Amino acid sequence: MSPVSIPPLENGDRLTRPEFERRYQAMTQLKKAELIAGVVYMAAAVRAKNHGKPHANIIGWLTAYEVATPGVETLDNTTVRLDGDNQPQPDALLR
């Protein structure tokens, strides 16, 4: 008996959150995928000037705010479960 193959995530797939999570966990090489309103979105390559530097600046700003504000934390590229159909992975977040 052969093991059941888990289909890969593909941009535009319409999935439930549990199925999205099952496929995402099976794709260990995948850096980022999001489920928004039941639709899979997979990020393209990012550029240093247009993404990397602004991202670093935002993380620095949020970290400074975290240090000055008890009870909050800065997170980077963390999956957020909003509801049953939405599971974004923002570049940065403060909670």
Image (tube, rainbow, N blue to C red):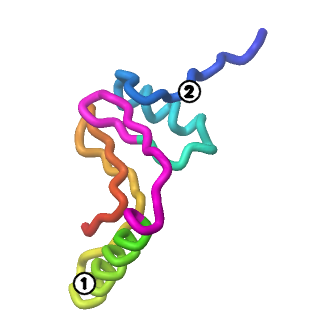
Q: Secondary structure at mark 2?
A: loop
Kind of residue sitting beneath label 1: Tyr
Kind of residue sitting beneath label 2: Pro
Quarter of the image containing the N terminus? top right
Is residue 10 toward the left or the right of residue 73 in the image?
right
Q: Is residue 78 positioned above or below 88 on the image?
A: below
Q: Quadrant of residue 92?
A: bottom left
Residue 40: say if magenta: yes
Mark closer to the chain start, 2 or 1? 2
Q: Residue beneath label 1, please? A: 65
Q: In the orientation shown, which residue stands out farthest toward the right? A: 1
Across and down, in percent, residue 2 comes to 76, 13
Q: Residue at x 24, y 31 (%)?
A: 37
Q: Which residues are magenta?
A: 34-51
Q: Residue beneath label 2, please? A: 8
Q: Secondary structure at mark 1?
A: helix
Q: In the orientation shown, which residue stands out farthest toward the bottom? A: 68
Quarter of the image containing the C terminus? bottom left
